[in-house]
Amino acid sequence: MYASLTEGESMIMEQLESKQIAAMAELPLCEGHLRLTDSPRGPVFTAEKCIGQINFRDGGILNLVPRIPNLRLEGDSGKILIELMYSVFGMETKREDYANLFEFCVRVFIDTVGRLLQKGLRSKYHSVEGNEKAFKGRIMFNEHIRQNFIHKERIYVEYETYSQDRPENRLIKSTLEALIRRTGDSRNKKGLKSLVAEMEEIPSSEDIDRDFGRCVSDRNMADYEGPMMWCNIFLKGMGLGGSSSGVLPYALLISTDVLFGAYVARKSSANRTDGAFLIKYRAEINTEGDATGVSVIRIDLDWNYYNREKDRTETDAEMMFMSAPGYRVIPRAEDGDRLRAMAGSYLADAMV
């Protein structure tokens, strides 16, 4: 199955798919978003105030697309979702290039890792033991006597080496390799292979859980925040880091209130010269059971506009809309949802 469902609308689900959705709906991150009810025709699924993608165990995909009043795109409502995502995440690629939300996320990961490599990967000191030809560090006497009773030309030592072989870099490489096997987009596959080639000297992670536990989060590692979030989503949330070839059934969700707010603010600030629009994103993951269970990934967006002239930070999307350059009438809001109506106003122009 490859289908789309507009938020607020309903569809009849197959029994196996309904069981997976029921398990997802019980996880805390789905509260108020995924709903499953009984009907004479079978289980009825409804998505409320969220967009995203649900991946089923049999490989089926259900895209959850936003509802925009008075905006009609015949036959391809997914274009609205892709326009929202590309704009909010500040992507330069044309929206038609990645209509699949999973492939879009892969594209974002490729871009974040590419920027990280341009700035330079972090290195760290490692303790290394070995039977060397020259002395360095300190002698490990017990091991030296045991191994070199005959080989007098060797000396067993322990020393420090400075390299890029650290848990964060190993996890990034493992994620790139896992995505090469998973992506169905030739452009994504090419980008992933190029990044793996640049990290040739860094080994892949041998123990993903252990490496995640050893990751460092401080201001010196700020550039790793985005790549590591995506590593967590792909390797653990989607189960790509498992030993099996299967993918963990998952729901990737973003609240439409959060998405519309970020989209309106991004569009409203596009032609402003008095400051800069900044956006950060983070992810939370709930997983039920082991590799046979289900997973829910929710991405939250934090944005602000720093106004240099007034030396203040603006965080209200409606005020951003009203102070945008040019004249734009605040649209009539359906059911009082002004944010959705303002997003629809910008989308109507963008989708022409």
Image (cartoon, helix red, strand yellow):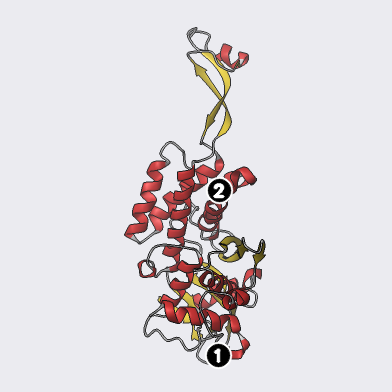
Q: Secondary structure at mark 2?
A: helix
Q: Amino acid at mark 1?
A: Ser
Q: Residue furthest left?
A: 186
Residue 332's image quarter?
bottom right
Crowd tier of the residue under label 1, counting other residues whose Cα lies within 10 Å: few below 14, some 14–19, many 20 or above = few
Q: Nearer the viewer, residue 82 or 3?
A: 82
Count of marks placed on residues:
2
Picture layout, residue 130 above or below residue 112? above
Q: Secondary structure at mark 1?
A: loop
Q: Position of residue 22 (x, y in %)?
A: 58, 76
Q: Residues within 10 Å of mark 2 (few under 14, many from 20)?
A: some
Image point (38%, 80%), residue name: 352
Give the label, 1 or 2, closer to the camera.
Answer: 2
- Give whichever of discs 1 and 2 has the lower sequence position: 1
Tell me the quarter of the image containing the N terminus: bottom left
Q: At 48% across and 53% down in the image, what residue appears?
A: 112
Q: Is residue 84 above or below residue 120?
A: below
Q: Position of residue 207 (x, y in %)?
A: 54, 44
Q: Nearer the viewer, residue 344 or 216?
A: 344
Q: Residue 80: where, in percent of width, then height?
A: 44, 77
Res. 223 mark: 2
Task: Name the residue type under label 2.
Answer: Asp
Q: Outermost residue toward the front?
A: 309
Residue 39: image tag: 1
Image spot of residue 297 (x, y percent)? 57, 65
Q: CA distance from mark 1 to mark 2?
A: 49 Å
Label drawn at residue 85 = none
Q: Are marks 1 and 2 in contact (CB under 8 Å)?
A: no
Of residues 320 and 255, the one drawn nearer to the viewer in this rendering: 320
Q: Is residue 351 visible?
A: yes
Q: Is residue 57 in view from this perspective?
A: no
